Image (tube, helix red, strand yellow):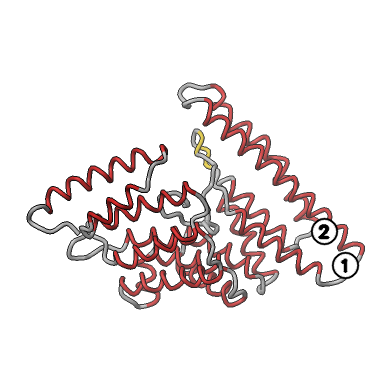
C-alpha cells in the first residue's frame, strides 16, 4: 500500500509506494517511489551546496536540473494519459488503448536520449546514474537500470541512496542475498532514513526462505527480524501512516502453524492497527483501519468488539468489504451462541 494490501516498495518500493501506473497491453510501467528519488536527489544537491562550485560545476548542475525537469514533465504526462484512458473506457477493442504504448514510447524516447547524452558527457555524475535508473525502472527496464545503479555505488560507495536502490533491484530480480547486503550498507551510511529500514524489512518478510538460510534463523525469527526493521523505520517517521499500515498488514502473513487460517499474533496485530488508527490522516484511512480491526477481532472470536469496529464504517467505498465482514460476523456469532459466550 497503501490500500488494503502489502506493497513491496520498489516499485518500492524502490521503497515500494503505491503507483498509479497500469499494465497497458503488455507495456508495464512501474513507478518507483518518488519520495526515494527526491531523497536521493536531495542528498546530491545538499552535498553540492556544501561546497563552493566552480563555474563549470554550476553549469553541470544546471544542466542536470533541466534533465530532471524534462523527466518529471514527460512521466507526469504519460501518467495522465494512462489515468485518463482508465477513466474513460473499459479497454475492450478501444483504439486509444491500442495506440497508447506507442505514444508512451515516443514521448519517453527523447528523455532517454537526453540521459544518454548527459552520461556520455559526464560519466562520473552519480546523481544522473540514480535518476536514469529510476527512469528506466519506471518504464519496466530494470535490467537496463542495473548497470547504472552498480556504477553509482562504484563512483560513490558512500552514497546510501545508491545502495538502497541497488538493494531494491536485487530484491526484484535477485539474488536476494545481495539485496540484504545492500540495505545493510545503506543503513550503515545513513541510519536515520526510514525508507532503508522499511525496504530491508519488506525484503526479509517477502523472501523468508532466503532470510532463514542467510541468517541461519527460524521462520518465526525471520518475522521478528522483519518487524524489528519495520519498527526502526517507524521510529524515524512515527507519523507515517503508510508505513504503519504496512506493518499492520504484515501480521496477516504470520500464520498459526497448527491452524493455518488463523493469525499467529493477533494481539500484536491489534496493537499495530490501533497505532495506525491513531495517526490516520483522514476519514477514508480511519474507516479502512476499522475494517481491519473488525476482521482481526473476528479471527479471535471477539464478536462484540468486531461489531463495534464495523459500526464505525459508513463510507460507500467500503460497503462491499463491510458487507462481507458483516456476513462473516453473523455466521460466526451463530456458531458461538449458545455454545460459547459472545465476548
| Residue at point 48%, 48% (across, down) | 283
Instruction: Determine whether label 2 and label 1 are within 8 Å by CB.
Output: yes
- Tell me the distance, in whole angstroms, between the alpha carbons under discs 2 and 1: 9 Å
Name the spot of residue 16 as percent of width and height, x first. 51, 56
> Left or right: where does residue 117 sit relative to residue 222?
right
> Left or right: where does residue 327 sit relative to residue 313?
left
Sequence order check: which comes first, mark 2 or mark 1?
Answer: 1
Secondary element under disc 2, as helix, strand or loop, is: helix
Secondary element under disc 1, as helix, strand or loop, is: loop
| Quarter assignment of residue 127 | bottom right
| Residue at point 63%, 70% (across, down) | 160
Name the spot of residue 104 as percent of width and height, x first. 62, 35
User: Which residue does the numbered mark 2 point to in the structure image?
Assistant: 61
> Left or right: where does residue 111 sit relative to residue 165?
right
Q: Looking at this rendering, what residue extends furthest in the left direction? A: 339
| Quarter assignment of residue 33 | bottom right
| Residue at point 30%, 67% (across, down) | 267
CA neighbours of label 2 inside 10 A, class few (<14), some (14 to 19), many (20+): some
Query: Which labelled disc corresponds to residue 152?
Result: none
Name the spot of residue 272 as percent of width and height, x first. 39, 64
| Residue at point 36%, 69% (across, down) | 223
CA neighbours of label 1 inside 10 A, class few (<14), some (14 to 19), many (20+): few
User: Which residue does the numbered mark 1 point to in the structure image?
Assistant: 53
> Left or right: where does residue 283 sit relative to residue 320?
right
Q: Nearer the viewer, residue 294 or 133?
A: 294
Amino acid at each position: 500500500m497503501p490500500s488494503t494490501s502489502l506493497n513491496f516498495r520498489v516499485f518500492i518500493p524502490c521503497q515500494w509506494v503505491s503507483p498509479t501506473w497500469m499494465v497497458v497491453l503488455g507495456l508495464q510501467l512501474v513507478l518507483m517511489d518518488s519520495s526515494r528519488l527526491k531523497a536521493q536527489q536531495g542528498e546530491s544537491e545538499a552535498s553540492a551546496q556544501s561546497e563552493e562550485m566552480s563555474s563549470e560545476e554550476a553549469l553541470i548542475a544546471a544542466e542536470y536540473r533541466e534533465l530532471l525537469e524534462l523527466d518529471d514533465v514527460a512521466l507526469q504526462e504519460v501518467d495522465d494519459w494512462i489515468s485518463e484512458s482508465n477513466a474513460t473506457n473499459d479497454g475492450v477493442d478501444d483504439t486509444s488503448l491500442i495506440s497508447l504504448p506507442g505514444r508512451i514510447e515516443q514521448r519517453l524516447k527523447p528523455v532517454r536520449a537526453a540521459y544518454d547524452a548527459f552520461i556520455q558527457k559526464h560519466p562520473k555524475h552519480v546523481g544522473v546514474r540514480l535518476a536514469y535508473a529510476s527512469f528506466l525502472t519506471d518504464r519496466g527496464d530494470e535490467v537496463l537500470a542495473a548497470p547504472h545503479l552498480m556504477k553509482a555505488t562504484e563512483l560513490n560507495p558512500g552514497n546510501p541512496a545508491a545502495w538502497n536502490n541497488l538493494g531494491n533491484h536485487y530484491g526484484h530480480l535477485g539474488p536476494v542475498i545481495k539485496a540484504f547486503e545492500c540495505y545493510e550498507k545503506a543503513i550503515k551510511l545513513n541510519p536515520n532514513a526510514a525508507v532503508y529500514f522499511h525496504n530491508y524489512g519488506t525484503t526479509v518478510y517477502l523472501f523468508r526462505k532466503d532470510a532463514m538460510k542467510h541468517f541461519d534463523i527460524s521462520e518465526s525469527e525471520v518475522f521478528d527480524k522483519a518487524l524489528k526493521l519495520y519498527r526502526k523505520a517507524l521510529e524515524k517517521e512515527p507519523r507515517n501512516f503508510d508505513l504503519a499500515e504496512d506493518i499492520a498488514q504484515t501480521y496477516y502473513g504470520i500464520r498459526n502453524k497448527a491452524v493455518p487460517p488463523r493469525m499467529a499474533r493477533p494481539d500484536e496485530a491489534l496493537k499495530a492497527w490501533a497505532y495506525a488508527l491513531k495517526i490516520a490522516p483522514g476519514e477514508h484511512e480511519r474507516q479502512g483501519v476499522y475494517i481491519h480491526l473488525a476482521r482481526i477481532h473476528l479471527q479471535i472470536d471477539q464478536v462484540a468488539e468486531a461489531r463495534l469496529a464495523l459500526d464505525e464504517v459508513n463510507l460507500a467505498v467500503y460497503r462491499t468489504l463491510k458487507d462481507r465482514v458483516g456476513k462473516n460476523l453473523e455466521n460466526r456469532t451463530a456458531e458461538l451462541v449458545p455454545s460459547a459466550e459472545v465476548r
